[in-house]
Image (cartoon, rainbow, N blue to C red):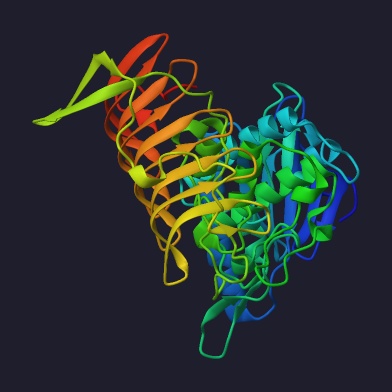
């Protein structure tokens, strides 16, 4: 399409912005409005057969309606002004975003600080949460599809993959509709998306890869993967806090079931580490005579250990914060003492982590103590090499969780203690504050029902 060409006698083409297998994007001006504001016109490629054309039109109208609703409701998603057919071609007209895409901030060889990457991830996940809450998958998260708006510095989500997907529709002789190619960008697409089955957590994977790119300066396509697990290998590229590393690692897990399932979950993990579970990987070796893949607990930015507060149970759960106790609950008394140099560990893995305790079926089962080389320690009960039962996990800076575990996560009754005299005491579920509980900090106490780390009715978190 040549410059100065006008569509619908309204949208005057100024120049081509980009092109690809899915279509061509133009910068245009709207002649019907005062001052002729700029807009973006997308010319979508479509199939040629009559059957495919009809399916294309149906998808086109459906997706246009979804984009229209999103743009009207949320300022960080471009508004859709029009969608129409002209001369056998299909067009979308969208809001022009005055700003720059994130490829000007995240690019090869450039390493951003951890603080900047954390902030960037929060900004992206916040806007991505909007569409995930609507059960919409973007499908093509990358720096070029994230704009930073000049007017307020906010991230705007552009170039939805659902629109691109329309251009790949095929209809077979049995009149079954299919998408002929995976929509997305290599390096940012996890396996399920490459196979044509994208999920909300596929977007989470892409954001995680972008975060790793920002930290390391290495393009996602150039990062190696473990040949056995297909996990991305990146930790040797940069020094980063254990908290951010653990969040990123979960975002980009090869198995989609092991990732945060939505942008909201990833955002919560990034911003409220106190409510995140301890994630564990059990030994996979068939013999304890060879070093297994040992349990790896995510290190968190917990802030040390404070005093303990007793728990009393009656009808429901009663909290008594006036009486304090200095002794922890009895947890596998035979392993309570930290093993000293005179006691040989029952197993040492390849990283130097030491396990003292009981084995059964070549796994940690029963009471045991696991001492990490970074100073972290778990004392308590194991089941099939996972923290399971009552135990204490002590973080490298002295913070502690004391209570019940279930398959490696905080589950049941417990207390999470910080050395700034802040603590949460109560019920946990799936590693989060969930159920009856109380948060005690220097600013006072907050008691009630918690759901997924937040106090109901007040939307408060604990110990931030």
Foreground pick, 394 / 83? 394
Foreground pick, 371 / 249? 371
User: Where 317 falls versus 41 (above or below)?
Assistant: above
Q: Is residue 356 visible?
A: yes
Q: Single out the residue that lies furthest toward the left.
A: 315
Can you tell which quarter of the image residue 140 is in?
A: bottom right
From the top left corner, tell me how far across and down residue 12 is, in percent. 81, 43
From the top left corner, tell me how far across and down residue 45 is, in percent. 73, 65
Q: Is residue 97 visible?
A: no
User: Where 424 falls versus 140 (above or below)?
Assistant: above
Residue lying at 58% horizontally and 80% vertically, measured from the top left? 51
Q: Going by the image, does 447 lie left or right of 109?
A: left
Residue lying at 47% horizontally and 51% vertically, measured from the top left? 135
Foreground pick, 30 / 440? 440
User: Where 159 falls versus 229 (above or below)?
Assistant: above
Q: Single out the residue that lies furthest toward the top.
A: 443
């Amino acid at each position: 399409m040549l410059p100065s060409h006008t569509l619908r006698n309204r949208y005057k083409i100024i120049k081509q912005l980009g092109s690809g297998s899915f279509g061509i994007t133009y910068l245009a001006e709207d002649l019907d409005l005062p001052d002729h504001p700029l807009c973006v016109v997308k010319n979508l490629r479509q199939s040629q057969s009559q059957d495919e054309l009809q399916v294309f039109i149906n998808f086109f109208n459906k997706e246009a309606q979804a984009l229209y609703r999103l743009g009207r409701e949320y300022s960080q998603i471009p508004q859709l002004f029009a969608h129409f057919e002209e001369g056998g071609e299909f067009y979308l007209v969208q809001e022009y975003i005055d700003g720059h895409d994130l490829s000007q901030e995240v690019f090869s060889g450039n390493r951003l600080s951890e603080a900047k990457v954390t902030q960037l991830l929060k900004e992206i996940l916040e806007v991505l949460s909007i569409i995930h809450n609507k059960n919409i998958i973007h499908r093509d998260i990358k720096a070029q599809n994230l704009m930073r708006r000049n007017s307020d510095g906010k991230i705007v989500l552009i170039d939805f993959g659902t629109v691109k997907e329309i251009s790949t529709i095929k209809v077979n002789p049995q009149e079954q509709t299919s998408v002929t190619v995976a929509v997305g960008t290599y390096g940012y697409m996890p396996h399920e998306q490459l196979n044509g089955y994208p999920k909300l957590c596929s977007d989470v994977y892409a954001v995680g890869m972008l975060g790793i790119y920002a930290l390391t300066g290495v393009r996602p396509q150039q990062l190696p993967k473990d040949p056995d697990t297909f996990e991305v290998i990146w930790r040797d590229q940069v020094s980063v806090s254990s908290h951010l590393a653990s969040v990123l690692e979960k975002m980009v897990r090869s198995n989609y079931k092991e990732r945060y399932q939505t942008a909201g979950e990833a955002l919560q993990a990034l911003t409220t580490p106190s409510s995140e579970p301890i994630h564990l990987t059990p030994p996979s070796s068939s013999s304890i005579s060879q070093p297994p893949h040992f349990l790896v607990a995510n290190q968190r930015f917990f802030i040390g250990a404070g005093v303990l507060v007793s728990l009393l149970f009656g009808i429901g759960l009663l909290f008594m914060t006036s009486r304090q106790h200095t002794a922890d609950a009895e947890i596998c008394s035979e392993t309570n003492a930290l093993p000293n140099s005179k006691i040989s560990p029952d197993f040492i893995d390849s990283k130097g982590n030491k396990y003292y305790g009981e084995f059964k079926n070549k796994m940690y089962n029963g009471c045991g103590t696991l001492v990490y080389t970074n100073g972290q320690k778990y004392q308590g009960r194991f089941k099939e090499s996972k923290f399971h039962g009552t135990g204490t996990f002590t973080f490298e800076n002295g913070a502690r969780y004391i209570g019940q575990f279930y398959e490696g996560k905080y589950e049941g009754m417990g207390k999470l203690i910080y050395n700034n005299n802040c603590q949460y005491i109560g019920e946990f579920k799936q590693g989060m504050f969930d159920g009856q509980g109380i948060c005690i900090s220097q600013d006072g106490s907050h008691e009630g029902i918690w759901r997924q780390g937040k106090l109901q009715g007040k939307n408060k978190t604990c110990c931030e």
